[in-house]
Amino acid sequence: LALAKAREAGVEPGLLARGLLALGSARQARGRLKESLEDFEPALALSPGPRLAARLHSFLASSLVQLGALTPAGPRIHQALELARSAADRWFEGRVLGQLGRLSQELGDFDAAARFYERALAVHREVGDRRFEGIALGSLGSTELEKARAEQARAHFEQALAIHREVGNRRSEGVALGNLANVYMETGRVEQAVRTYLQALAIHREVGDRRSEGHALGNLGDIYRETGQVE
């Protein structure tokens, strides 16, 4: 109804599409994923330019992945990649390559995921996107850990942690610490794992990352039960 009224009022389609992208992104951030789809789809129907369309397809795919709809998400991400390239938008191309890595990882194809993350990392470095360079390094580390390459994973997580601290990305700093703690557990360094989980937990609570806080508490609980310690 609001969209119809905006059209009747003569709102320029590109402006309307950008407004719907902003609204859908806000809903997505609050976990209202199905509602966000109701913003992204109509925005695409307005035939926006390639840069905006790339973002709409990408955000729409992100909601689909979070809803567990991996199959329909794939074509959306590939479309976003083609659009970003057609617009010579290297900055966003890097982010979409990372999205393809995440999708491959969700599907259990860790080799493909690593290839996408490596391509994303190269683009992030090319355009100077330090924030997402750190995120790509962390994602690469997670694929290495899935393939039982603990030391390679540790190296990536340590690089990611240094960048997150450099750019002041506290949320990702907490995630990187949690990932390092996972490596320490995998390699039998239990005391180091506990210390690192506790560091991660403090940051998760500071930034309000409840999901990661739950993971850290669960991992600490497992350690305390296995070692007979009282939490």
Image: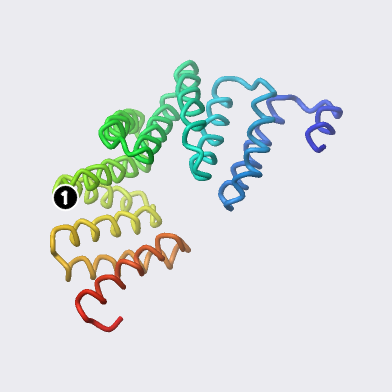
Can you say which quadrant of the picture contains the C terminus?
bottom left
Report which residue position mark 1 lands on: 150
Seen in the image, is 90 located left or right of residue 160? right
Residue 120 falls in image quadrant: top left
Location of residue 200 with respect to 115 vertically, above or below: below
* Quadrant position of residue 156: top left
- Give the side of residue 107 with respect to residue 153, left or right: right
Number of residues whose C-alpha sits closer than 10 Å to that of mark 1, classed few (under 14), some (14–19) or many (20 or more): many
The residue lying toward the viewer, choosing from 177 and 42, is 42
Up the image or down, 214 lies above or below 142; here it is below
Q: Looking at the image, which is closer to me, 3 or 133?
A: 3
- For this orientation, the residue located farthest to the bottom is 230
Q: Is residue 152 left or right of residue 231?
A: left
Query: What colour scheme governs how the chains and residues are painted in the rendered image of this protein?
Result: rainbow
Residue drawn at point x = 69 percent, y = 23 percent: 46
Q: Quadrant of the N terminus?
A: top right
Q: How many marks?
A: 1
Q: Secondary structure at mark 1?
A: helix
Q: Residue 201 at what x, y percent from top left?
A: 35, 67
Q: Nearer the viewer, residue 66 or 98?
A: 66
Image coordinates of residue 22 in percent, x first then y, are 63, 40
The residue at 67%/29% (across/down) is 43
Left or right relative to 20: residue 199: left
Q: Could you tell me the amino acid type at mark 1? A: Ala
Residue 148: image location, x then y, percent: 17, 47
Residue 230, placed above or below residue 164: below
Image location of residue 174, percent across then percent down: 35, 59
Task: State the residue at coordinates (28%, 70%).
Answer: 222
